[in-house]
Image (spheres, helix red, strand yellow):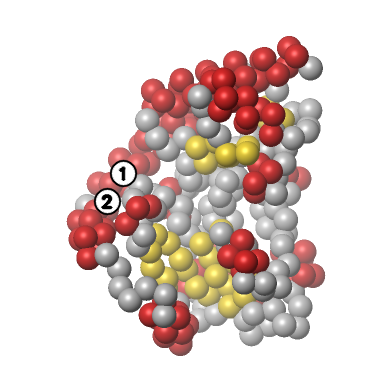
Amino acid sequence: SLYEVPRSLEISLSLLRLKWVDRFKPNLDELRGIIKPNTKLITLTHPNNPTGSQITEKTLREAIGIAEEHDIHLMVDETYRDLTFDEPPPLAATLSKNAISLTSMSKVYGLPGIRIGWAVADKSVIEGVRAVREQMTICNSAFGEVIALEVLKRRKQVLNDMRSKMMSNYEIVKEWMDQQSWLEWIEPEGGVVCAPRLRNGGSTRELCELLVRKYRTFVVPGYGLEMDEYFRLGYGGDREELVVGLEMLKKALEELSSSS
């Protein structure tokens, strides 16, 4: 949605492609090269979805410096920040008035249905966001706000539980990936999604369609993310379902391999 929403509004975009060779880290020299005189905003996501890559504090500060040089804003989607494997960089918004930090209850807290999130930014930015928001939705659901409040009161416990589940499930996925001759990946550094790709290249469309049709298993195909040879694999849910899902994925890969 970071680029599909602007596209739907016919806003001009320049995409900074994250590359396998860079381990899905943003290339800031390339970022400098795509900034135009009319550029208003830079957006980054870390940990990245779907690759799970994380930027360092040095990279974050450098990206903020680029925004400051051009007198524009850097908006950082930090939804998975509380689920990094190592210590994350500081909140972007604490480092510069040009930086905006976004997060929500959707991912880490598993509450996408209540549609509650927040931004941390300079007062002038927040006032502008509030003015736009008031034209779209008058207020949040009071019921959703109560749910969010009760969960945030237990934030430490919830995050500890989520991190424990994340690391346990990640070890399952890592062990499974180490055994796969048809797939390769850049190991994620946070979040609960990763982006394996077919080792021999090609589209994952046939694999994803076979998984749904025959094995009743769903992964997000890469062609919907403009990453045709990849698919998005989530591991934030039930442990038993993850194990079964990986077994179904293995069977689908074996079937495709034997028929090619």
Q: Amino acid at mark 2?
A: Lys
Query: What is the residue that sits farthest to the top in this orientation?
Result: 258
**Residue at position x 74%, y 35% in the image:** 203
The relative height of residue 212 versus residue 113 in the rendered view (above or below) is: above
Where does residue 231 sit, x and y in percent of width and height? 63, 37
Residue ID at (46%, 66%): 102
Residue 175 in sight: no
Q: Is residue 53 above or below residue 128?
A: above
Helix, strand or loop at label 2? It is helix
Circle 1: residue type:
Asn
Is 2 left, or right, of 131 in this rendering? Answer: right
Against 151, residue 259 (above or below) is above
Q: Would residue 242 be seen by someone viewing this image from the given angle?
A: yes
Q: Residues within 10 Å of mark 2 (few under 14, many from 20)?
A: few
Q: Residue drawn 69% across and 33% down?
A: 204
Up the image or down, 220 lies above or below 244; here it is below
Image quadrant occupied by the C terminus: top right
Q: Which residue is mark 2?
A: 156
Residue 176: quadrant of the picture: top right
Element type where label 1 sits in the image? helix
* Residue 33: mark: none
Residue 123's spot in the image, x, y percent? 42, 85
For the N terminus, which image quadrant? Answer: bottom right
Image quadrant where residue 2 sits: bottom right
3D distance between C-alphas at marks 1 and 2: 6 Å
Neighbours of disc 1 within 10 Å: few (<14), some (14-19), many (20+): few
The one nearer the camera, 63 or 198, is 198
- Residue 191: % across, % down: 48, 45
The foreground one among 113 and 32 is 113
Residue at numbered disc 1: 160
Mark 1–mark 2 CB contact (< 8 Å)? yes
Q: Residue at x 53, y 75 (%)?
A: 99
